[in-house]
Amino acid sequence: MKLYFYYGVMSSSKTANALMKKFNFEENGRTVALLKPSIDTRYGKTTVKSRAGLSSEAFLVGDNEKIEDVIGRDNSFEIIVADEAQFFTEAQIDELRKFTDQGTMVMCYGLRSDYTGHLFVGSRRLLELADTIREIPSMCAKCGRKAVMNARYSGKNIIYEGNPIDIGGEDKYTTLCHQCWKSGKL
């Protein structure tokens, strides 16, 4: 089995892809555990929801929790799908790798970097350990080139400093190419 990491900027349909994969696997009789980190409570504690309207219940994983304690030590699931994987700890990503080594397919979806341009801890570890790494591309909201940055903004100004973890949506963030992100203005 493989550990997959699908990454993209915000609004690149990562969650929609994760939910569609879960649905397709279950439709074909496979057992799937959907995971989400406890920091993401935008749609309720145990709900994963995409902007396209797809949603599903998920196992909530806290920072100090072992995934096997959350889904069950016997791991009766054939597939694990993890949304917002950038927020998992290094130890939790190592645990997902262990599940893969024991025969469970693991598909992680998340952001590569924060709005300051630095890797998230979970994403860094996935880049180090994943068997397959694939980008889900998106377009710069300003010029139409390939988006590679999650830009946090206030008014028309791009913000480059502050707490790198600030959960939000299109009210705080947009996706930009590096050139538009560097410009400092929307």
Image (cartoon, helix red, strand yellow):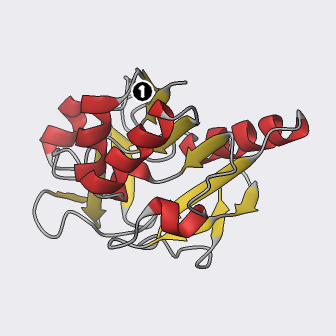
Please give the name of the residue rendered at 32% of the width and 45% of the height, measured from the top-left corner. Answer: 94
Question: Is 169 situated left or right of 148 in this image?
Answer: right
> Which class describes the residues within 10 Å of circle 1: few (<14), some (14-19), or many (20+)?
few
Residue depicted at x 71% and y 47%:
32
The reply, left or right, for residue 167 in relation to residue 15 is: left
Percent across and percent down for residue 89 are 29, 58
Write the residue at 36% across / 30% down: 143
Looking at the rendering, which quadrant does residue 5 occupy?
Answer: top left
Q: Which residue is mark 1?
A: 144
Q: Nearer the viewer, residue 20 or 164?
A: 20
Tag count:
1
Residue nearest the observer in this picture, 93 or 5: 93
Work out whether residue 94 can be spotted: yes
Q: Amino acid at mark 1?
A: Gly
147 lies left or right of 69: left
Q: Looking at the picture, how far across and down is residue 69, in whole percent?
A: 50, 68
Report which quarter residue 58 is drawn in.
Answer: bottom right
Q: Which residue sits furthest left?
A: 161
**For the N terminus, which image quadrant?**
top right
In this view, the residue in front, 134 or 166, is 134
Up the image or down, 95 lies above or below 28; here it is below
Which type of secondary structure does the marked residue at label 1 adopt? loop
Residue located farthest toward the front when viewing the structure as drawn: 74
- Residue 55 x, y percent position in the rendering: 74, 59
Residue 170 x, y percent position in the rendering:
47, 60
Examine the rendered structure and indicate whether residue 20 appears above or below residue 165.
Answer: above
Give the quarter of the image for residue 135: top left
Camera sees residue 51: no
